[in-house]
Amino acid sequence: MDEPADEPKSYVVAHVREALARDPRTNELHVDVTIAGRRVFLTGEVTTDERRAAVTDVVRELLPEYDVHNETSVPRLEQPGEPEELG
Amino acid sequence: MIRVAAVGDVHFGTDSAGRLRPHLEQLAERADLLLVAGDLTTCGGSDEAEVLADELRDSPVPVLAVLGNHDYHAGREGEVRTALESAGVQVLEGETAVIEVNASRVGVAGVKGFGGGFAGACGTEFGEPEMKAFIRHTRSLAEDLEGSLAGLDGDVRIALLHYAPVKGTLIGERLEIYPFLGSYLLAEAVDRGGADLVLHGHAHRGVEKGVTPGGVHVRNVAQPVIRHAYNVYALGDGGVA
């Protein structure tokens, strides 16, 4: 879907978030979207590298006229620390 | 002392093999059981659940889980459950389990929960059928939880949820979405039914620690919050705090 040039940015942000949530390649609900001019910045965390790549694909397909900056990250899990004693 | 390992929101996809398994090799040295607080999958696909099931298969400690909203997305929650059960995971949907640990009994009441908001700023059973159905769903699950806890025969009792029972573990989330993150009805059920610990997930940007109005420990174990493969909580067997 091409967004008209005068589409309010808040609508564009909402459409991107909706696409990332609904597209089966991503189903990501925790990506932050920031629009600056013709650049769209994606931040936050996704679970796997494959899904991170798909986030870029989905947004590029939705907004082909925008430069997509995928700055999401995939967190690396650490071993647990000491138990918390709850009594 | 009973050591409970817990994590939620692992969000497994078909490409997640190996993400959790290496961290489970020392599980038996660290914990007596593992509880998983929902959102086991990304899209609710049985293929995703199979990948997680392979990671949890032959776990050295009992594994119990509830489903989360993601696990319902594809409408195949029954297949998700079956895949996990085939690997030995006990899936609790309004059900209970009692695990023997070092001559103590750990009772777990598991239910997904749902949203609606928190006292003073919550939805009510009023208006359109859809709105009433939304709150009724939460209320029904909360009633199940209260009944399960009240009837649970354990030296230690744990409520395992996906949705949050209190606002305290939501700090960092946007206020506008609180009603979609949990409900006070779940905390009320815990305080009435009695428990030593409530575990939940769902709130990726919240914080780990909270407490119910009745004084029960609440821990948000969503993996994006705890940043570990799991956290461990040590509980005495002296009954409800």
Image (cartoon, coloured by chain):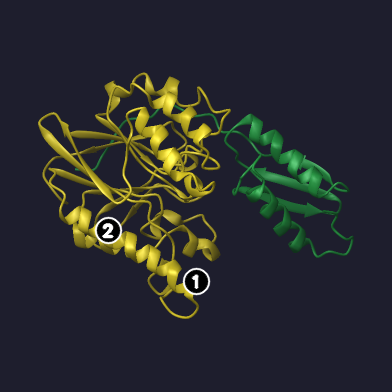
Drawn side of residue A11 relative to residue A26, left or right: right
Residue depicted at 41% across the width and 75% down the height: B124
Q: Who comes first in sequence, dot 1 or dot 2?
A: 1
Q: Is residue B224 above or below residue B100?
A: below
Q: Residue at x 45, y 67 (%)?
A: B134
In the rendered structure, are the residues bearing label 1 and label 2 in contact, judged by CB atoms less than 8 Å apart?
Answer: no
Task: Kindly identify which residue carries mark 1.
Answer: B130
* Residue at image location 37% in from the left, 71% down from the top: B119
* Front in this rendered view, residue B154 or B75: B75
Q: CA distance from mark 1 to mark 2?
A: 21 Å
| Amino acid on which the number 1 mark rests in the picture | Glu
Q: Colour of chain A?
A: green
Horizontal arrangement in the rendering, residue B96 relative to residue B177 (left or right):
left
Q: Secondary structure at mark 1?
A: helix
The chain holding disc 2 is B
Q: Which residue is mark 2?
A: B144
> In terms of depth relative to the viewer, which is nearer, B78 or A49?
B78
